[in-house]
Image (cartoon, helix red, strand yellow):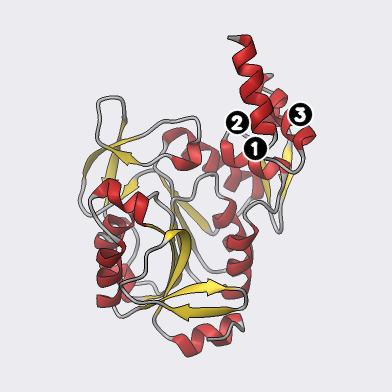
Amino acid sequence: MLNMKITRLMKSMQNYDNPLKFLVGIFLIKLRVSYFFKIKMNGYVLNFYPTSLSLALWINPHARKDDELFFERYLRANDNVIDVGANIGSLALRAASIVKSGRVFAVEPHPQISKYLAENVKANRFSNIECFNCIAGDETRLRGFSDIRSDDQNSVVINQNSIKIQQQRIDDFIDSGLEFSLVKIDVEGYEKFVILGAKKVLQKTKCIYFEASDNLYKNYKCTFHDIFTLITSLGFEIFRIEDNRIIKISNEYSPSGENLLAIKDIVEFLDRTKLTL
């Protein structure tokens, strides 16, 4: 058993550019002292919690640089933002540091990860973030949610081993009277149901930044065509990002696991980001 654990540890080390820092991080987590360490990010700090994302950012604070770069290029002071699938809060906190007097709504279903999210917000003394511990979906009901070691990949599931979490519609707990510059959705394939429960909010939203994966959509018996049809019916056009430009895509596109953009006002978006078509 010990040999198997050592073998798995050695294989994991090979996935990181800084294997020594990975090893130190694992020991800090095993010794239950990682909580005493901070991860310095751009405009905020994170507590080093025993989670997959915390470990990845402990090893390399730029591990999610593409997402942060987009937030930095797009967001402005006074913007309102919704982060669905906020995890420990890295993007919600970056958004809060940029929008200043704007508001950030962070939604994280997993009970323990949601606590870490709230504690990270408290550690940064941000008063413009509101946290919600629920599943964002298309109806109010209890849903099953996974509880796996790779906590950044937990998702809605239907089996006896899942934990039960309240699902709610975004339209029911976030003020649809506000205007939103950005709604970010990263829910491991459950995007369709988040959108169905947020139609009022999305009517007053300029841009959606969402994870797209046909493999993940299959888990919920839907396809990218379904997502494309739903989002475009709300007045958005869908693009993918490539270097410093965006490329419009059709409903025949097959995403293999990437972040896409749904944009209402392309002129305003290009002016904000300085990206090109």
Residue 204's place in the image compared with 265, above or below, is above
Report x, y in % for residue 234: 27, 76
Report x, y in % for residue 74: 57, 74
Number of other residues with Cα within 10 Å of mark 3, as a class: few under 14, some 14 to 19, many 20 or more: some
Which quadrant holds residue 257? Answer: bottom left
Q: Residue at x 26, y 68 (%)?
A: 199
Gap in Å between the C-alphas at discs 3 and 2? Answer: 13 Å
Gap in Å between the C-alphas at discs 3 and 1? Answer: 10 Å
Mark 2 lies on residue: 50
Amino acid found under the numbered disc labelled 2: Pro
Label 2 or label 1, whichever lies nearer to me, is 1
Number of other residues with Cα within 10 Å of mark 1, as a class: few under 14, some 14 to 19, many 20 or more: many
Q: Tell me if 230 is positioned left or right of 53 in this view.
A: left
Gap in Å between the C-alphas at discs 2 and 1? Answer: 7 Å
Report x, y in % for residue 101: 57, 69
Label 3 or label 2, whichever lies nearer to me, is 3
Mark 1 lies on residue: 55
Mark 3 lies on residue: 24
Q: Residue at x 30, y 73 (%)?
A: 251
Instruction: Please tell me which residue lies in front, 247 or 94.
Output: 247
Amino acid found under the numbered disc labelled 1: Leu
Q: Are marks 2 and 1 in contact (CB under 8 Å)?
A: yes
Q: Tell me if 217 is positioned left or right of 210 in this view.
A: left
Give the structural element (helix, strand or loop) at label 3: helix
Amino acid found under the numbered disc labelled 3: Val
Q: Say whether disc 2 or disc 1 marks the residue closer to the N-terminus.
A: 2
Can residue 82 be seen by looking at this rendering?
A: yes
Q: Tell me if 19 is positioned left or right of 84 in this view.
A: right
Q: Residue furthest bottom?
A: 267
